[in-house]
Amino acid sequence: MNPLDRLGPAVTEPAWISFAPNVSSALEAARRHLLDLRYPEGYWLGELEADTTLESDYIQMEYFLRAPRQEKIRKAAAYILEKQLREGGWNIFEGGPPNVSATVKAYFGLKLAGYSPQEPRLQRARKVALELGGVQAANSFTKIYLAFFGQYPWSAVPAIPPEVVLVPEFSYFSIYEMSSWTRAILVPLSIVWAHHPHRPIPPGAGIDEIFRDGRRNLGMSRDPANLTWRNFFLTVDRSLKLVERLWFKPLRSQAIRAAQAWMLERFSKSDGLGAIYPAMMNAIFALDCLGYERDHPLMRRAMNEFYRFEIEERETLRMQPCLSPVWDTAIALYALLVAGTPPEDSRVVEAADWLLARQTTRKGDWQVKNRRAEPGGWAFEFANEYYPDVDDTAMVLLALDRARATNPERLQVGIRRGLAWMLSMQGSDGGFAAFDVNNNHVVLCRVPYADHNAMLDPSCADITGRTLEALSCYGYRKGSTPVDRAIEYLKRTQEPEGCWFGRWGVNYIYGACFALRGLRAAGEDMREGYIVRAIEWLRAVQNPDGGWGESCDSYDNPDLKGMGPSTASQTAWALLGLFAFGDYGSSSVCRGLEFLANSQTAEGTWHEPYFTGTGFPRAFYLRYHLYRHYFPLLALAEHAQATAQNKVSGARRQVPGVLNLAPGT
């Protein structure tokens, strides 16, 4: 049987014709609104929202530095209380269940801020914390930060000795076998661990009452079977702690100097260590332990960069985990160009120039496993020279392919350098990861502090798909070795239902969208059975309201793939996936477009309270405030462009998905 026969009845009259004016007006309103959001310097930047663990850590940092600013603490605490769930705990994504680490951190932060445990809100929080397992059930980094204040014994937290920095690069246990964000978090934290700081807290701010069964069972549990990697690492951990008790540590001074040098070197041409919240906060802790005073230029710079994440309002203060200008600008620019903004438009030219100015020019951590490549990628943030990533680079290249720049020669040179760097980052499995090549030694996921669920940076379908899409712009199609290897990777990693896991967006809808777009751009036959399965899956998970949605819960429970309240961004991803199949007129597409047109606000954007971005699956999620805007704009624009070129395609009327109608083909 022809796989296309399983798609159901043919669309006899393209339903988009009946609501084309609505879609057209929604498209133009969205385009105008996005242009209005542009900064005068030429970039776009939306708020990046996370959970309240950031505000809780912010309060702890104020006390760690021994000069708490009470007004800032008051506002951060007010924001934490604003996000408290009705039953008393705190979650890590909108609509999610209470999370033990977030709840423990919030409880301690509120007590540091002066809230009494007798207050009803804290009583409810205490009850939830204990129901979830108490402090003992929190993750390792939560316990380490509690140890700073005497609220958890140093002997019961994982050992992170600075000597880890001395392990040779070629070793299986080198820091370069960890993900880039993990090493940026751990190196400064190793300096802090070596000093075992103890900071005083206000009277009555302790949290003994949320230890389940008192302060018992604080050690790290072993696997029931003896011969496991976890038990091996726990044995190593105990050995390291025994060594720590000795007065003679021959490598300690050298290790601290090496860790300090590593950290300070990565301050260069960066908005902070790794340009991410936890690494930058740990760097401040480390500088304090090393004796840097508050008025030292390095400490002032580190703190000022960290405080750039603040969003302070009249009564609340919230923190962003990082800033996303390159990512936001690349996607916004691409969407505007697809939406018909002329490439010669001065706003397009300024955005392209701005992106070109942020291309990395020096080698970073990626070179340890990719020594021959020259720099040329783009990072996520304003400045982060040591940590460009493939995803941003691919998105920038997609935008620059359509754009114009003030200096055409500079544009071509930038594209060539970016393309060469991106190609060099292909893994041995054929896929592409974010920051490193072949960062996939799963044994490291068993170390005691790996419970942040992000020790590694392996290849993933969403980045591989976006990379294929970018490569196609520059002549790399099926038949070229890099493309063929990437296609085979996507075939191997497809889920049985037909979708793909979404590493950097929630979740299987995101993975399916960008895998399908990459396969289409690469020249794969979109009538292949495995692609038809993906399309069938997308149609099967469409919500009754015409939209698509998926909760972060699907990371914990794969049975919830593609299930959740409809959102604008996830509806756009599903539509873009269907468009990759050549489907611009099926009932699924029509209902999805109607959902976007009908849910658009008067300002030309969309409401979206849910988190659709992924930091660390099962541990840390993100709400990109521009996702709800530029992805729907892109979906509306691609549909408008395709249907303008093929108003009444008889072939498409008969069998959706046969024609290749992607822009530019």
Image (spheres, helix red, strand yellow):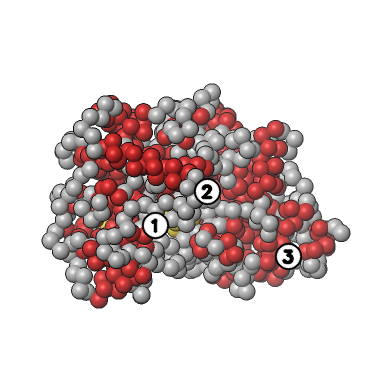
Question: Could you tell me how far apart the alpha carbons at marks 1 and 3 are, in whole angstroms?
Answer: 36 Å
**Label 3 residue SS:** loop
Q: Residue 120: x, y in percent?
A: 25, 76
Contact? badges 1 and 3 (CB < 8 Å): no
Q: Residue at x 23, y 63 (%)?
A: 208
Question: In this rendering, would 652 be left or right of 611?
Answer: right
Instruction: Tell me the kind of residue under disc 3.
Output: Ser
Foreground of the two, 407 or 519: 519
Foreground of the two, 355 or 150: 150
Foreground of the two, 372 or 206: 206
Q: Which mark is residue 596?
A: none
Q: Residue 264: x, y in percent?
A: 30, 32
How crowded is the residue under tag 3: few (<14 C-alpha within 10 Å), some, or many (20+)?
many
Image quarter of residue 279:
top left
Q: Residue 336: x, y in percent?
A: 55, 50
Q: Which mark is residue 50?
A: 1
Instruction: Tell me the kind of residue under disc 1.
Output: Ala
Q: Which mark is residue 586?
A: 3
Q: Is residue 584 visible?
A: no
